Amino acid sequence: MKNSLQISLLVIGLIFAINAVFGGFIQIYAGHLGDKYGFKKIIITFASAYVVTLMSLFLSSIFLAIPLVFVILFILNQAIGNLIMPSLSALLSLSSDVPLAGFSYMRVASNLGWAFGPALAGYVASTLGYPFIYLTAALSAIIPFPLYFYLKEKKSEARETEKFSFKKVSRELYLFGIGVTFLFIVVSQFSVTLSIYANNFIGLDTTSIGLIYFVNGIAVAAFQLPIYRVVRKIGLWNGMILGSIFYIIGYFSMALDHSLWQFMASMLIVTMGENAVTPTGSAMTSKIANGKSLGAHMGVYNFFMSLGRGMGPSYGTFLLSYLYTPFDIWGLAVVPAAVGIFIFISRQSSEKKQQSAISVI
């Protein structure tokens, strides 16, 4: 956006913030739609719309390269992509004997795409131009369609028929979600902040930045299952805390990075945090829902994630715009994750007290 459409850093951060918050709100209702009409039907419907918006981005970039049009289509595309996730997460949870294992295996599969996607995008952008990234993405999104029709529909304890109500969602999820929001402010430095910092501050080119994200995808595929075994042993709360610590170490170490190989090493540490946090957060939500209104619970959890993801790019681009030293930028960038750790520890302590009280009774 910055190089091709001449959009400022702060505006780019604002675009991602609007996109994430808007996408988060609609995910709540999207989860309810899955509870009401069936998760498989919702996945197929919104996956189709996602392909259409990708093609629209490609065509508009070729024939109508107007920044406002591109931004609107970009926000719409990302929002529709978000609508798939609550039903996908709920269906996966209901299909897994151990939800943490199911989400971990999905992470391995999805991040094989993450591994090759940025590297391929960097190559496509440098050879054919940025518009063809969206054509490539649209063609890639069409490939899994036959598999969607082989999905087996699963139901929550009761199919939803009435309107969505926030009272259906457990209070514990809202408290957990506050910590998730702070953590994902840091998680989302992965997208806008990292790429702009590596390019504008360190001078890495587009292909090199794609290779940094390639490391992320490969590391998820290689280490997700070992990290799953660790989290299953130490517990979900400790898994969230451990993952948050990895995020803090990985992002702060970027203040020391000056070469592609150093950024790759930092990304490896960040990915260990991702391996711990991403499946664990979804498994925690499944546990809190306890089989009731699972789609709605997943939608609310995704809202908190999206809220953090939306605030993250704005926070990151603000730091990049007004701070000048790497230690200032990355030192402040990881502070919200420390707040998240504090909340996770307090909720873990509260849960232990409740369990102790129940055992005494």
Image: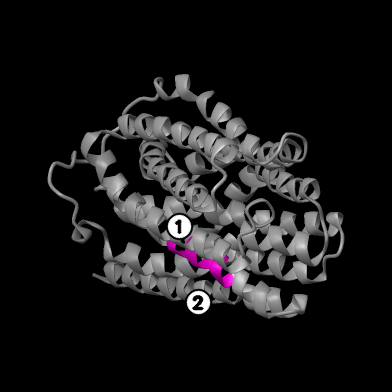
- Please name whichever residue, 66 or 149, is drawn nearer the observer in this view of the structure: 66
Using the rendered view, name the quadrant where residue 268 is placed: bottom right
Q: Give the labeled residue for mark 2.
A: 342
> Mark 1 near mark 2, Cβ–Cβ under 8 Å?
no
State whether residue 312 appears in this view.
yes
Q: Residue at x 35, y 38 (%)?
A: 94
- Looking at the rendered structure, the kind of residue marked 1 is Ala
Please identify the dominant SS of the magenta region. helix
- Looking at the rendered structure, the kind of residue marked 2 is Phe
The magenta span reads 307-315
- Above or below 236: residue 222: above
Q: Give the labeled residue for mark 1.
A: 20
Q: Position of residue 29 (x, y in %)?
A: 28, 49
Q: CA distance from mark 1 to mark 2?
A: 24 Å
- Above or below 358: residue 60: above
Q: Residue at x 38, y 57 (%)?
A: 22
User: For numbered disc 1, what is the local secondary structure?
Assistant: helix
- Please name whichever residue, 193 or 52, is drawn nearer the observer in this view of the structure: 52
Using the rendered view, name the quadrant where residue 234 is placed: bottom right
